[in-house]
Image: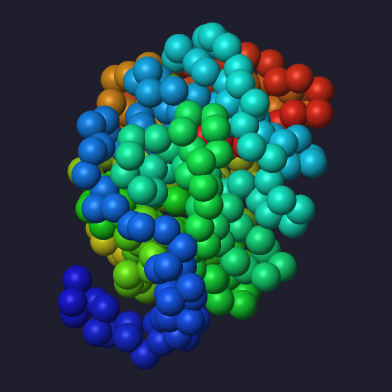
Amino acid sequence: MTLLIQSKKLIALTLVGFSLVCFIQSARSVSPTDGVGREQPDVTQRYDFNGDGHPDFVLITTFGQTAIWYLNNNIYLSGAGGPTLPLDWNLIDAADFNGNGHPDYALFDSRTRRTAIWYLNNNVLVSGAYGPTIPAGWALVAVGDSNGDAKPDYILYNSSTRQTAIWYLNNNVYVGGGFGPTLPFQWQLVGVADFNSDGHTDYILYNTNTRQTAIWYLSGRSLARGVYGPTITSGFQVIGAADFNGDGHPDYVLFNRLMHLTEIWYLDNNVYVSSAVGPDTPAGWRLRLP
Ligand SMILES: [Ca+2]
Ligand SMILES: [Ca+2]
Ligand SMILES: [Ca+2]
Ligand SMILES: [Ca+2]
């Protein structure tokens, strides 16, 4: 790890320089906790807002209003209103940043490239803090624990170079990072989850042309190996992954925006096992997370 960081030190300087400026601001914004208190694996807890052991859906309107839909596997149980995002801010992902057992929203403003964490207690906004600001040309695209310290990290993407980067965080505070693998042409990074259960977060890639998916297994920030996953049905897109049936393996969440349909595709690592229909979303609402 040290050698890798050293070798990429020069090119990483730009990224580090940017974040140092924000370090001072964000360090004061909230008291960071040590992340102790996680009791469930990341794959389940990241989207389990009510703490019942089942991942939940986050829905959003074009006006930034959010809602949590509590699920038991693919079955809708109930829904609750969540906080409404400020103008120009997008909900990128959710994870437990302050280590209190509750998933929080990771927000990104693509105009200013600022990031923010909204700390939630279930569906209720408790407080907010700025995270590091992202360098020009880059965007925050996902959140996951990439270095296995049980603290969520930022996954960044540069659409002109197709390069990814991982920024390790302590709560909302940047502590280190560097470049990750570069994506092939026509492939998108749609989310992260640990598919091979080695404790390292892996990339979920989606080919917008062929609708094929792939899993890129990461070791640190390096690509260890890539395998193909299932090809997605026409009209649907992969939103992300979480373990809906509780077998320890992340499952794909699919959404058909035009028809307001959701589906869960159960996977064993990268291999499709079966699928189930999830709840339909109301008009005006789209599935945002997982
Ligand atoms: Ca839940
Ligand atoms: Ca981490
Ligand atoms: Ca993994
Ligand atoms: Ca599963």
Q: Relative to 3, say whether 92 is above or below.
A: above
Residue placed most toward the observer, 185 or 44 = 44
The residue depicted at 27 percent of the width and 85 percent of the height is: 7
Q: Position of residue 118 (x, y in %)?
A: 53, 47
Q: Quadrant of residue 246?
A: top left
Residue placed most toward the observer, 5 or 162 = 5
Q: In this view, does 81 lie to the left or right of 243?
A: right
Q: Position of residue 132 (x, y in %)?
A: 48, 68
Colouring method of the image: rainbow
Q: In this view, does 28 lie to the left or right of 225?
A: right
Q: Relative to 130, say whether 286 is above or below.
A: above
Q: Position of residue 192 (x, y in %)?
A: 43, 46
Q: Relative to 191, say whether 168 is above or below.
A: below
Question: Is residue 252 visible to the viewer in this orientation of the structure?
Answer: no
Q: Relative to 141, say whether 263 is above or below.
A: above
Question: Is residue 86 visible to the viewer in this orientation of the structure?
Answer: yes
Q: Position of residue 248 (x, y in %)?
A: 28, 26
Residue placed most toward the observer, 188 or 117 = 117
Q: How many marks?
A: 0
Residue placed most toward the observer, 8 or 213 = 8
Q: Which residue lies furthest to the left in this view?
A: 2
The residue depicted at 52 percent of the width and 62 percent of the height is: 130
Q: In which quarter of the image is the N terminus?
A: bottom left
The residue depicted at 19 percent of the width and 80 percent of the height is: 3
Q: Is residue 219 left or right of residue 139?
A: left
Q: Residue furthest bottom?
A: 10
The residue depicted at 45 percent of the width and 51 percent of the height is: 143
